[in-house]
Amino acid sequence: MIAAALIFAFACVGLALVLNLWRLLRGPTISDRVVALDTMVINAIGLIVLIGIRYATQTYFEAALLLAMVGFVGTIAYCKFVLRGDIVE
């Protein structure tokens, strides 16, 4: 049963990544692109967690945590660049 649920979850997360990529490429504004990139990071974290569940190892969960921290800092940097035009003051 868990194998079928994992296959369904992989398919859903893969579809979400494709749709986010479409929004990233076709977004009318830079704000849409920043939100799409942030959502892609969240979906990548979900994908890594699913791989960790599939292989039953703790390493993937630690990698997901590191990607979450890097994704947060990246989103803040993108937003600061959009608002001010410069990241470092």
Image (cartoon, helix red, strand yellow):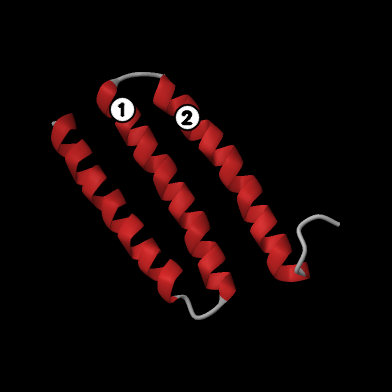
Picture residue at 81% right of the left edge, 55% below the top = 88
Q: Left or right: 79 with respect to 38?
A: right
Q: Within 10 Å of the Cα at label 1, are there few (<14), some (14-19), or many (20+) other Cα atoms?
A: some
Q: CA distance from mark 1 to mark 2?
A: 13 Å
Residue furthest to the right: 89
SS at mark 1 in the image: helix
Which residue bears the numbered disc 1? 53
Residue 55 in the image: above or below residue 8: above
Which residue bears the numbered disc 2? 63
Q: Left or right: 26 with respect to 35?
A: left
Residue 26 in the image: above or below residue 19: below
Picture residue at 31% right of the left edge, 27% below the top = 53
Residue 59 percent location from the top left of the image: 42, 21
Residue 81 percent location from the top left of the image: 71, 64
Residue 64 in the image: above or below residue 83: above
Q: Sequence-wise, which precedes: disc 1 or disc 2?
A: 1
Residue 26 percent location from the top left of the image: 42, 76
Q: Where is the N terminus found, in terms of image quarters?
A: top left
Residue 6 percent location from the top left of the image: 22, 37
